[in-house]
Structure formats: structure tokens, C-alpha cells
Image: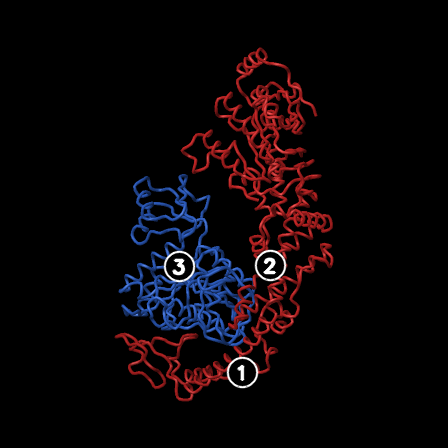
Chain colours: A blue, B red
Amino acid sequence: MMDALLDTVLADGVRTVVVVGTAKNVGKTVTFNALRALALRRGIVGAITSIGRDGEAADALDGARKPRVRVEAGTFVALPRDLLPRSPALRILDLGGPSALGPMVFARAHVAADCEIGGPPTARGVRATIDRLCELTAEPTFVDGAIDRVAPLSGGTAEAIVLATGAASGTSIEAVTAVARSTIRRLTLPGRDRLRERSRRIIVEGALDAHDALELLAGEPGATVVVADPTRVAVRGKLLERIMSAFDLRCERPLRVVACTTCAFSPAAILDPRALARAVGAATGLPTFDVLAGLRG
Amino acid sequence: MKCDALTAERIGAAWLHGALAPAGDFGRRAQDAAPPFGPGDEAVARRRCAQIVDLAARLDPDGVAHVRSMVRRAPDPTDIVSRATAGDPLSDVDFFELGRLADALEATAAAWDAAGGGAAGRPPTIAPLAGVLAPGRAGGAFYLADAFDPALIPARAAYAAADAEVAGARRQLAESLDPAFQPPAGAEEFIVMRDLMPTVPAGLRVVREAPGYRLLTVELDADALAAVDRREAALAQLGRTEDLVRRALAQEVARYGPAVLAAGRALGELDCTLARVAFTQRWGGCVPELGGRRFAFSAASFVPLRAALSDAGLPYTPISLDLGGAAVLTGPNMGGKSAALATCGFLSACVAAGLPPPAQRAALPLFASVAWVGGEPPLPRERLLSAFGAEVVRTRDALSASPPALVLVDEFARTTGPHEGRALLVALVETLAARGVFALVATHFEGVARAARVPHYSIAGLGPRALDAHAAPDVHAALDALAKAMDYRIVAADGDARSPSDALALAGLLGLDAAVVERAGVLFDAAAGPAASVTE
């Protein structure tokens, strides 16, 4: 069943897969590892990197136990210099831009090892890191991502986003589903279409925040509102719904979200995994999987 | 050469600093470490200029650009060498960086040869250290290869075998489970619904339990746990072996450290040199005579202006001048008086930076200071002063300079009453001349040179009826017309000569109401004294 997740993600010649989460502890790294393990079964080692700091045994912020990232032999990896494992040695291929833990190092594993991975702090750094990995290997690059730093993705068919959600982002299936629906609505803003745009257009420079949203709603509805990319939409929940129903909200650089994964437990809540996967799938209209339970919603 | 920010801006020294910016970190450090040439450095500065002129003539310009691009690629090894020398361990990234440095030095040397540089001045390489690192440097990468130490081979084989043993043990345990309860690919932990698994079968361990499901993981048996221990031991052994190899390599780095640092310094000096060579190849330059009692140059360029005019597709007229001390410069508006002053300052900044002055010939002192007075907005500290007040304060500072100094005065006292202003300017020129500083004083006041008993120069200016009296359609057209009509050369003027400002013609060209210009012409003719006589 999980092969269907990989098929969905790698369809149309995808070169980069970015896993993002609606919150911490929603199974982002679990999804990331599952995708790589599924790919490895097909002989794809690919490349990996991260936007945050991942693979460490415990979360640096809250101390919760985190899944390790295993780097199989042959894998290309981009990680900050200070996270480079002392042993086994990796083949150092290149250096990239700065991160909080030293310059990014592009390397290749000779033998398998568990390690921490991390990434650059800026959207531009993420873009440069992904581009360099794509130069180093023709196989897919898997990115343990962050939802607020997917802006540099091109949105073309070569880059796919998987949204991880789960009990850490809500204490009920309804709450988790609402967050997932709203997030997907936001991330899948349509791109500009000159033929279908309204005669009145409002270009939003920077972020579309709550202040902008209320100002828009106070005026005449119906215009096409354009932001640079979906991450520039800073409003959530019902306010976002109101904006989207009153205006034709579009972006210059659309993103391509291809699937969701769910995680039914968190330190704060335990939900029914089957019902959660089904509800998220229905709410987002995307193929949805629970990789821990081996379920498809 | 001391000069404040405003002077540096006016004479193009700030622009020059950017134009001579080194390509790489080594060059930046070398530039920061090298003080500008000043009084007493004449012989060294002249040799430096001669070296640049020679290289500019000898090296292929494209080759110079290529060498500079190679220099830019060289990483800075100072921190790595310092740590190695102190006995600290080095990482594989450090060895990678040293390898890149060795490559960059080789590439720079090859580019130098290709540019026609020859053996003298060829940048050094660090071939011995490159040889030490060579076993790990296939394809420009770095890997702690087995060839560094045969002990790595069994250590790596033992770790790979132990890792495979753990994977095999896990797989075997997972495969021994009911197919319905096997972990999904890549997951150490997995969920099974309680209704599907009323009791936990052997071989599985509960990580977390909920009313509806259990989070499980495969229970490792004694054999698997022993395999995990063996893998940990093999990894630790591999780590120790790899660290020994790194330590040995770090000792080699320390051994070659002085050579590496020397190569870095040489690369920095080459970077600074090539910045000057590229400048000279583009804008020209001569080997100056330094330290005499004259400030003389022919066909010299104020390059910031020349570059801007070139970008705008406009011609530039190089100028010549011969100063023996203080002198007065008069001439028409927009005739290039300020540019002439700036040229003097710019040439001074060039030689202070070890750059051949962009002129056909040049003889000048190495100045201890250069100061610009006049024509500037007040500095922040002088905001409470009027334009005239700010000018006086700057003049007071400029007068405190000791020779060899250059003072450039641009229309001093133009914002006060003409009689008092002229008197102040005459007194200022007398004082500058008496103090033995070099000074060029641009003004529209008449008779200043004669009154102060200093040489008088003038911009050749507009010929008779050189400008059409009709207004140009726009400012660009006016500038074009002006560039064609204006003779920007500096010529010696009769001490009694009145230098025309050509203000009326320029006002007409720039679109001032024709009636106003015409009336001004009538008034001017009525009041005019003897015609200006300009002699070359």
C-alpha cells in the first residue's frame, strides 16, 4: 500500500520531494524516512537534505525522541559542516552557502550511517542547496522541509510537496482536518492566468497579513488578488476562507502539493489513525497515507 | 595619504578603492595590510608603478581576467593551518579546503603562464602538500581513502559487515512475524489497530499504547542485540582509525603550514597587483617621477568622470597641467574646473595606491595629505553652519596641513559678498603659496592670481559663437552641444586676463528665457571691460 505513496510522489518525473509539516511532531521525518526507504527498495538512493535540524535523537527544542536519518551507501547528502559525522567518513564533494552550523557540505556516503541532517536558514539557501544536489545526482532529492520555507520551489512538475499532519496540530480529527484543509488551500493557490483574471487586480507586495485581509474585505469584493507565492499568505482559518470566497486569490509562483500523510498520536492527543487518514484525504482531496499504520485514507 | 571622506569622494579616491578591489580574500587582506605610499616611499612607489606598467604591457588582458577569476576561487587556509600548527585535529572539510587551495594555486599559476606572465612573479604552488592529500582527491573531492593508511581497509570492512549483520538480524526478525504485523518500509516503529491484534505477539515490543491501537517496534533478540553491540564497537574502532589518519594528515599540514601561508600571502599580493594591471590596461598609466618640486602631468584622466562619460557615449578630453606650488584656475561654467581639481587629487590617490597615474607623463610629490575645500554640501557636524560657514571650517582644517600637501579649492567664498569673498580668496591663495603647499584654486573671481602673485591657468573654454543661442531641446542635447563646443584644455592665462564664464551662452543653451538672456547680454556689454585674452 505504501508503494502507492511513492508512486504518487514520483509521478511526472519529479526531481525534488519536499516533506513539510503542519506542526512539530506530525511525522514529517517519519514520512521522509518512509519515502526514502520505499525508494531504496527500487534501487533509488537519491539525495537528502533538510531545512531544519533533523535526524538528531531528541528534538533540540522540546527534547522529545525523534527518528534518526539513516544515510545509505551511495546517498548524496547536504548538511551543515558541524553535523558532519566524524565516522564513517563521507566523501566531501563541495561546499555551499552558510548555515547556523557552518557552511553547507555536499557529500556522498561510502557506507551506511545514522546521522543528523540540517540545512540552510534562508529560502535562497534552500534553493541553492537543492539545485546543487540535483546537479550531483539525476535521482530524486528528498528534503525534510519546513512549511514557511517552500517559497523557493519553482512549482513546476519537477518539485513535489508532501504535507505531513497529525494529532500534534489538533486534539480532534475535526481540528486536525481543519488545519490540513486550510494549509492545503493556502499551499495550492492557483497561479496567475491572464485569461481568467478579473478586470480589477490587486498585487500584494510582501505578505498578505490579517491587516491586509481586513482592508480587502472592507472594500469591494471580486478582484483578483495576487501574492508572490503561497507562503506569503499569512492569514489562516476562517479569515482565509472569507478572503478566498470574496476574491480570486492567486500567486505568481504556485506550488505543487501531491499527497498528505497523517500521524494519529502526539504527546497531547491520540486519534483513530484510520478515521484521521480518511478525514484528511476527504478534506484536502489529496491522496493521504498513514505510514506508521500502513493505511491509505 | 591622508584625506577625509568628502575629499576622497571629490577626488575619486573612494571610487578608486572600489575599482582596485581585489578579487579574493587573500587580496583583501593584503590590501588592508598595505598602507598607502607617502613621503619617503618615492623609490618603492615608483618601482611599484613601473612593475604595473610592465605587466600591463606584457600580459594579455583576457589572461589577466582569467588569473583573477582563478585567484577568486582560492579558499583561505589561515584558520586551518593555525589549528594544525596548534596541534588541533582537522576535519575532512579542512582537507577538502586545502585541496581546493592547492588546485586554485595550480590553476592560477597555469593561467599566469597562459597570460604571458613568465617565471618571474609566477604565483607559488603547494605541490608537496597537494601530494600528501592526493590519495583522497579523486575528481576534486576529498575522501579519507584507504590509500592513506592500510589500517582503514579492515576497519571499514568490519563496520560494513557488522552493519549488514544488524540489518540482516532485523530483517530476519521482521520476516519471522505474521505478515499482517510487519513494520512498513523504513519505519522502526509502526501502528497496529487493537481490533486486529488483541494481544501482542512474541517478537514485538509495545512503545506506546492507546485505546484503539498500539505503537510497536520489532523486539531485538539476544543475537540481534549482540550484533548491534558489535556494530557499535566496529564503528568506534573505525572512528579511532580514521582519527589517527586525520591526525597524521594534520601533522603534514602543520609541516607545510609556513609554505601554505606564504603561498596565500603571495596570492594576495598578486591579486592586488592584477587589480592594478587590469586598471592600467583599461585606462592607461605611466611611470611617474616622484618627489620633485613640481606637480606636472600631460594627457591625464579623471577616470571616474571618463568612465561615466564613456558609459553615456560622450567623449572625454584628457588634460595637462604644470604646477610649481599654488595656482589659480579660471574658466567657463561647465568647462571642467572642478574636474581639473579632481584630476590632481585623483593622480595623487593613484600613486599613493601604487597605481600608475592614468596620464601620458606625470611628475608629482607623494603627498602626506590632500584636502578639498568648497563646492560641497556641509558635513553633518557643520549642519548648523551656512554653506559659507562650513567652507570656512574646512579651509581652517586644510590650512593646518604640513607640506607635502595638496589643497584643492573649488570656488571658495562664492556664497558671500563678492568683494569680501575675493579678498578672502586672495589672502587664502597667498597663505597657501607661502606655506609651500601645492594648491589649485578654481574661481570666477577676477584678478586673484595677479593679486596673490601666483600663476594663472584657464580652461580654454568656448570659442566665439561656439554655442547656438537657441535652447537645446533637453538637457542631454545641451550636454552634447556643450561637449562639442567646449575646449576643456587647461592653458596658461595672462595674469591680467579676465576669463569668460560663458554664463550667458550656457543659460541660453539650457533653456533660460531668451528675453532674460538677451537683456543680460545688453547689460553685460555695457559694463564689460577689456576683452579676455587667453594665451596658450
Q: Quadrant of the N terminus of chain B?
A: top right
> Where in the figure is residue B224, as x and y percent of width and height?
42, 86
> Which mark, by number, is residue B442?
none
Tell me the subunit letter for badge 1. B
Marks 3/2: CA–CA distance: 35 Å
Residue beneath disc 3 = A147
Of residues B382 and A155, which is closer to you in this image?
A: B382
Tell me the subunit letter for badge 3. A
Of residues B298 and B93, which is closer to you in this image?
A: B298
Marks 2/1: CA–CA distance: 36 Å
User: Does dot 3 land on a helix, a strand or a loop?
Assistant: helix
Q: Are marks 3 and 1 on the same chain?
A: no
Tell me the subunit letter for badge 2. B
The answer to whether residue A297 is visible is no
At 72% from the left edge and 49% from the top edge, which residue is drawn? B54
Marks 3/1: CA–CA distance: 42 Å
> Where in the figure is residue B147, as x and y percent of width and height?
61, 78
Of the residues shown, which amino acid type is indicated by label 3?
Ile
Number of numbered tags placed on the structure image: 3
Q: Nearer the viewer, mark 3 or mark 2?
A: 2
> Where in the figure is residue B276, as x and y percent of width and height?
64, 48
- Earlier residue among tags 2 and 1: 2
